[in-house]
Every structure is written in C-alpha cells, then in structure tokens.
C-alpha cells in the first residue's frame, strides 16, 4: 500500500541536513561526538519537542499558537506557586499544571471558533502577554526552586545517561503520528487545514476540531513546562518572554509544515526540533554568543520557509507541465482518430 | 467618426475547452441606451471583459468611433473611453468619496495632493449625477445607490464615451433604481453610449432604445425596443433545439422525503415551500441569485434560518449543522466543488471518505483496507480517471473532481441527494455519467434534488420543477403539465405568472 508520497522527499532532505550538520560539528569540535554531549542535545530537544507538537497541530489547521512558550512558563510558575504555598504532592502539582495549560489552550480555541476572532495570530499573541503577566503574578516575580523530586523526574532523570524526557518525547511522537495519520480526528485536522468550508460541509464539526488542536497545544505546553522545571530546577516567570514559540514554529516549518495549512508530519517536526538543538549545541561548543545564535537561527527559519515556497512553486509548475502534456496528448489522439 | 461609439465585429474568444464568444456582434450608438440580455452562461460577462480589456479577443475587431482598437489591458480600454460599473462595486469603503473618484488620477499642487481642488470637482460631478453629498465623507457611509453613483462619477471624470452597467439594479431599492434611470437618461442626453446589462425585462422596456440578445456565446439579434415583446425576447434567449443528451430513466414515486414549509432567511428567502419525493428528481430552476442555492444550504444546515419548518419523511427536524443534516440522511453536492466540495491538497482516498470518517473507523483507527477497497470500487464504477487512489485531487480534471465529490456522498449513504449545478464546467461525456448516477439513485428509491441553470438539463432530467425568483417559489411544474416547457419555465423565472 502506497502512502502519501508528497513531502517525504523533503524530509529526506531534512534528515540529510541533520546528518551533515552532525558530521561537520564532529570534525570541527572533538567534544561534539561524545555520548554526554549527544545526550545533552536530546535533553535540550525535549522541551522544544513538546511545544512543537501543539504548534504543529495548529499549523496544520492553517492557524498558529504564539502562546505556547508563555503557557509553558506559566504552567511551571503555577507549580512554583503551589510549591511556595506548601503543597507537597508533586503529582498534584503536575495535574494542576496540565489542567491549567489545557484551559489556556481551550481559551485560545474558543476565542477563534466561538468568538470568531479573525486569525489566531492576534488572539494567541494576546494570550502570550496575558500568560507572561500571570506567570509573574502567581510567583510575585520571584524565581522558585526546591521542587519535589517527582516533578523534577521528567526533566532530570536519565536511564544509562539517556534522558527520560526524550523517551517520553519518542513515545508521544509515535502516538501522535498514529493519531494524525490513522484516526478520523487526525484526518479531519488535515482536511480542515486544507479546506475549512469543504470539511464543515462534509459534516465535520470544524469548530470542535480547532478547539481540540488549541487545547492539545496548551496541554503540550504544560508538559514542556514540567520538563523545564526538571531541567533547570527552577521556575522563572520572566522567561515567558523568551523566543520559545519561534523555536517551536521553526521546528515544524523546517520539518515540512506550512503556514497555509494542511501539511506537516511528526517525523519532520522531530527532525526540525533536533536540527535546532544541534545548532544551538554547536554554537555553544564553538563559543558563539547568543547574539550570533539568534542571527543564524533566524536565517535558518527564513531559509526553511523560502524552501517551502520554492517547493510549492516547483510542484505547481510540474503540475501545469503535466496537465499541458496530457492535454496535448489528448488532442493528438483526437487528431489521429 | 463612425456611426457607432463602440462596435464589435465577429469577435471570438476561446478558453481551454470552451468557445465563450463566437462571431459576436455589438454596436452601440452615441446617446443610446443599449440593452444586452441573455441566459446565465450566454457569454455576457465574457463580452464585457473583452470590451474592458480584461480578456483579449482571439479573433474579430473592436472599433471606437470607427477607429480600430486592440485592448491588451483594462488601462487601454479606459483610455479609449470605455468604462464599466461592475455588479460588484469597486469601492474602498473607508476612503472618502473624493479618494474613490480620483483613485489613481489624483491631481497635485506641487508635491502634495490638491485635496481642495479634488473635493470641489468631486462635489460637482456628484451633483451633476443628482447626488448632493459631502465628498469628504467615507464612501461606505452612503447607501448602495450613492456608491454606484461614485462608480459612474469615475466614468464621467475620465470622459467615458461608453459606460457599461452590469446588472446595475440588482442591489438597489425602488427609489434608487428610479434615480439611476434618471442618471442614465441624462448621460444619454450628453451623448454617452450606455450598455445596460440586465435580467429584468421591464427595466429594458422602460429604459432602452435597442436591445441585443445573445445565447450560448452567439449573437442572436438586435432590434429597436418597440419591435421586441416579452415573449419574443424570451424565445430569442432560450430558442435552441433540444437534443436528447439526457438519458432520463424513471423511478417509482415514493414517499415525501423532504418537505420545506415557509423557509425564511431575512432578505434572502421568503416563505419557500417545496416537497421532494423518493424515486424522483426535483429540478430547481431560476436565474442566478434566485435563492436556490440559499434554500438547499439552509436545508443542509450550512446557514442559519430565520423561520420555517423542515420535515424529513414526515418528521419535523431542526437541522443546525451539516453534521446533523448528514445524520438525517441529506447529502449536498455544492456548486463550488473546489472551494466547498473538495480538499484539493488531499488524496482521492481521503476526499472519498471525508463525509463518512466514522463509518470507516474500526476501534480507534481508520480502516485503511476498507477505505482502499471502497475507494477502488468508486474509482471503477464512477470511472474516475486517475493513475492511483493516492493522486492529489487538485490534479484531476473538473469532471473527475466532480466524480470524487459524488463518490464522497455515495459513501455517506444518504436518502436525499442535492446536486447544485452538478454539470457546470465538465465535458459532455462526464455530464452523461453524472446523469446516470442520478438515474441509479432514483431507481434505488432515493430522492434527488437538482439545481440547474441549464434549461435543457432541467427539462431533460426532472420529474418535477420548482421555479424560483428573488427568494420566492414562483411555480411548481410537473413533468406531465402543459407548462413543462422552456418558455413557460423561463417566463416564471423572469417573474411572469403561469395560468392553469
């Protein structure tokens, strides 16, 4: 059974780019190809990989969620506030964080589908600021540490050096891959992004589909927040301002998703997230400061989008050529008759 | 200088697979209001676009004041003095009236725009058109009538020799129509030629000096208005021979599957009532904008309704969404298949199951094997020409795309199939295959509703016809009634009443 052919060529290219980067970095710096460093990269990837799942769902629907980074930090800060208030159960903290993230995502979805705000770019940008403020409020603008071990486990623990967080990411990505490619709801998400009205008129409740995507995005952000607490040991509301959203978008776009919707895969997104983590790691090893990092990462995102545009243009051209050739052949056939 | 302000001789315009205009003739005198009339798809829009330089004619000549012209783009047509007021007005609602009139023709004083001068001139032009308004106000603050006058003012400002008005009265109230006619007469007195395209016969008789009829892209006839009658105009518009390209088969009339009572949407539909039976095709006839699509969309739950009742198999239903409609056994094959029927970037496989994803789910997952089998089956029975089931739908031809839409709805196993313009833009062979699908549905006892703007199709395939106009049902005609003919159905569609 042949599956979707389109896009796999591009993912091959993405994989190639990742391998190439690793090879270059191994040669440039002897420390890169050490087990510890590679595991460090995976640990770093995990946070962005969580955010990118939600971002991908939203991008497939031709939307966007600019609040994922702020939402992750907010959820971490909610746990911080509980910690400070003397809650001792780590499990309770995580449950509340996931609920909080989900509710924020649900609000994003509701703003879009029930209040009919024009494009999620605006509403989620607004929510980003709201969440940034809330994160600072619940923590009284203070960093909080001393989280229970159970909360830190996900972001900190390793099995033979292999980070648990990345194992969870792999499991999550496999599940999400099956979800997107093999279930009715998953298929509906692609179709809604491809043609919202046709999908609605086919009897699919597109408003609910979109709300689901944004709620999932919120829950994924919360998971990312939990990982971040484990990794750094702290929560800091001021971090809500960092470009986490951009990294998540970049992972999806590098992985083949498109702002026009209907496209994107979990495998591609995973590759995209790895590329970004390898890039950041390479910068650190070669002692390039964050200013230089920002410039290069920005260029990589632009390059990825540009490649998307070029690819779409080439596909359209091929299609036109094929159609023209077909028409010509048919006319010849008619003449022959 | 020739006798005519604008003259078209033997103009032919082809699009891939269609001849839109064939040996078209048109001659408008200065100071004449010239009516242009034809059925939907007769070629009026193409004719206007050739005149305004949007399309270039493949063959034939255009003369302006006896001088041969070739319009490569709209600017060249405008420079020759041809202006057009389109049905959809090109008004920037947030900009002032002055800005709209002077758009791209701003006058300057030094480096800056001379607003004082432009406001004064705009006020003058608008006043000459009978509109005493402040041109500093935003265009959107005025009604449709004034906005249309702004478009006409643009034409006056460039000293247009001929102004084309495309269905100018369709969005105007009674008073505004009177004002527009007055303006047309004043422009006529100034020696401007007006090409007045309208669906409304009474307006043509009231306003025009001569009327030209076109049909199927061909020129039919031009006569002075006193030589036309209502009936002769309609006959000229529809008068073609009916070939038997319709393989109509009859089912047995079953129960009333769908009953609509006094369906109302404010400003769109007024008390629409109709009944559709199993084993029959109910045709819906009428002009574009008669409210047929709006009626079926409302029944399908795609748009909210303001009043009325819907019964399915005798049971009242309250359908609020397409999802609910599908659950009640309704399928709607929309007119705009690219915009509303298909996800073009997805495969045939996915599009075929879009309306029945639940049915193809086993446990948590989609049953790809069953999807594959039924998909291959549809490709075979509907004869969808494609290299594989995984082909992207956007790459198929129009006829094959329509077959994918049909396959999608056959999958939903509905009882009531609504086809909105099912054969528009597809070739003759594919049309017959679509008719055969309807035949087999009817023979299986299903109810088929077919909206069509092609009269031969309506007469060829329908068991009964509902004729609509202006959001109302004008007549219901059975196949064995004496009114089941082109002239009478057309008459009803144009607002006439049918006696018994």
Image (cartoon, coloured by chain):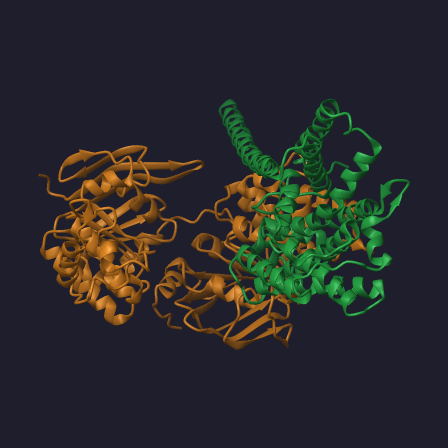
Across and down, in percent, residue A293 comes to 62, 37
Q: Is residue A330 above or below residue A176?
A: above
Say whether residue B396 is visible: no
Q: Position of residue A142 (x, y in %)?
A: 68, 61
Q: Position of residue B332 (x, y in %)?
A: 58, 59
Color of chain B here? orange
Q: Nearer the viewer, residue A71 or B153?
A: A71
In the rendered image, the residue lying farthest to the right is: A160
Query: B141 and B260: which one is in front?
Result: B141
Looking at the rendering, which quadrant does residue A146 occupy? bottom right
Chain given the colour green: A
Q: Quick check: B437 left or right of B463?
A: right
Seen in the picture, residue B270 relative to B83 is either above or below; the reply is below
Q: Is A46 in front, or is B341?
A: A46
Residue appearing at x 58%, y 44% in the figure: B401
- Horizontal side of residue B265 vs A210, given as left or right: left
- The quarter of the image holding the C terminus of chain B is bottom left
Q: Quadrant of the N terminus of chain B?
A: top left
Measuring 24% from the left and 66% from the top, which residue is drawn there?
Answer: B177
Q: Nearer the viewer, residue A221 or B282?
A: A221
**Left or right: B390 as drawn, with respect to A318:** right
Question: What residue sits 18% from the left and 44% below the top?
Answer: B81
| Residue A21 seen from this side | yes
Q: Quadrant of residue B253?
A: bottom right
């Amino acid at each position: 059974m042949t599956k979707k052919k389109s896009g796999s060529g591009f993912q091959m290219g993405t994989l190639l780019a990742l391998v190439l980067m690793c090879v270059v970095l191994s040669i440039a710096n002897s420390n890169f190809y050490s087990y510890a460093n590679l595991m460090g990269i995976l640990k770093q990837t995990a946070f962005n990989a969580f955010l990118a799942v939600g971002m991908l769902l939203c991008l497939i629907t031709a939307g966007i969620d600019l609040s994922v980074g702020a939402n992750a930090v907010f959820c971490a800060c909610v746990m911080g506030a509980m910690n400070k208030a003397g809650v001792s159960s780590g499990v309770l903290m995580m449950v509340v964080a996931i609920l909080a993230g989900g509710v924020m995502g649900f609000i994003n979805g509701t703003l879009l589908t029930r209040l009919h705000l024009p494009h999620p770019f605006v509403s989620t940008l607004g929510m980003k600021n709201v969440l940034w403020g809330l994160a600072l409020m619940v923590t009284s603008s203070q960093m909080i540490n001393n989280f229970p071990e159970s909360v830190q486990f996900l972001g900190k623990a390793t099995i033979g050096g292999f980070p648990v967080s990345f194992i969870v990411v792999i499991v999550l990505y496999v599940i999400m891959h099956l979800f997107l490619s093999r279930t009715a709801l998953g298929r509906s998400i692609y179709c809604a992004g491809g043609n919202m009205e046709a999908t609605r008129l086919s009897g699919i409740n597109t408003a609910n589909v979109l709300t689901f995507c944004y709620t999932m995005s919120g829950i994924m952000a919360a998971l990312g927040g939990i990982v971040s607490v484990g990794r750094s040991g702290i929560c800091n509301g001021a971090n809500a301002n960092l470009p986490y959203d951009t990294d998540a978008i970049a992972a999806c776009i590098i992985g083949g998703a498109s702002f026009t919707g209907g496209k994107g895969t979990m495998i591609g997104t995973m590759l995209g997230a790895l590329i970004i983590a390898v890039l950041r790691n390479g910068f650190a090893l070669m002692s390039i400061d964050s200013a230089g990092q920002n410039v290069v990462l920005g260029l990589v995102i632009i390059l990825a989008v540009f490649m998307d545009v070029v690819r779409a243009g080439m596909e359209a051209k091929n299609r036109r050529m094929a159609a023209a050739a077909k028409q010509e052949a048919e006319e010849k056939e008619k003449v022959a008759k | 200088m020739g006798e005519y302000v604008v003259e078209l001789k033997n103009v032919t315009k082809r699009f891939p697979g269609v001849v839109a205009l064939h040996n078209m003739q048109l001659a408008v005198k200065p100071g004449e209001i010239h009516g242009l009339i034809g059925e939907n798809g007769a070629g009026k829009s193409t004719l206007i676009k050739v005149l305004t330089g949007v399309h270039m004619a493949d063959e034939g000549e255009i003369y302006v004041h006896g001088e041969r012209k070739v319009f490569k783009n709209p600017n060249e047509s405008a420079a020759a003095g041809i202006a057009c007021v389109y049905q959809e007005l090109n008004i920037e609602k947030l900009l002032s009236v002055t800005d709209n009139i002077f758009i791209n023709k701003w006058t300057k004083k030094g480096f800056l725009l001379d607003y004082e001068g432009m406001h004064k001139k705009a006020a003058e032009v608008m006043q000459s058109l009978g509109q005493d308004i402040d041109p500093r106000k935003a265009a959107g603050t005025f009604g449709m009538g004034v906005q249309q006058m702004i478009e006409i003012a643009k034409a006056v400002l460039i000293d247009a020799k001929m102004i084309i008005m495309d269905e100018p009265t369709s969005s105007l109230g009674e008073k505004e129509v009177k004002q527009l006619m007055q303006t047309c007469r004043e422009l006529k007195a100034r020696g401007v030629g007006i090409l007045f395209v309208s669906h409304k016969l009474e307006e043509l008789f009231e306003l025009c000096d001569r009327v030209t009829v076109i049909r199927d892209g061909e020129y039919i006839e031009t006569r002075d208005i006193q030589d036309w009658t209502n009936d002769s105009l309609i006959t000229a518009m529809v008068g073609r021979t009916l070939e038997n390209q319709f393989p109509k088969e009859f089912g047995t009339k079953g129960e009333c599957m769908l009953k609509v009572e006094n369906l109302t949407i404010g400003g769109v539909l007024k008390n629409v009532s109709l009944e559709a039976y199993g084993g029959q095709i109910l045709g819906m006839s009428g002009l574009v904008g008669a409210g047929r699509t709006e009626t079926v969309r409302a029944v399908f739950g795609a748009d909210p309704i303001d009043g009325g009742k819907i019964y399915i198999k005798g049971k009242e239903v309250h359908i609020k969404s397409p999802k609910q409609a599908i659950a009640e056994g309704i399928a709607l094959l929309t007119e705009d298949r690219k915009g509303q029927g298909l996800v073009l970037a997805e495969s045939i496989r996915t599009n075929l199951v879009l309306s029945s994803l639940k049915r193809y789910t086993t446990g948590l997952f989609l049953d790809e094997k069953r999807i594959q089998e039924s998909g291959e089956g549809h490709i075979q029975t509907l004869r969808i020409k494609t290299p594989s089931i995984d082909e992207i739908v956007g790459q198929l031809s129009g006829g094959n795309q329509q077959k994918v839409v049909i396959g999608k709805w056959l999958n939903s196993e509905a009882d009531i199939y609504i086809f909105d313009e099912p054969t528009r833009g597809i070739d003759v062979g594919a049309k017959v295959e679509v008719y055969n699908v309807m035949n087999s549905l009817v023979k299986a006892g299903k109810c088929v509703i077919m909206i069509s703007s092609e009269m031969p199709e309506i007469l060829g395939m329908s068991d009964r016809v509902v004729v609509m106009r202006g959001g109302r049902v004008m007549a219901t005609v059975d196949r064995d009634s004496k009114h089941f003919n082109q002239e009478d159905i057309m008459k009803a569609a144009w607002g006439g009443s049918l006696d018994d």
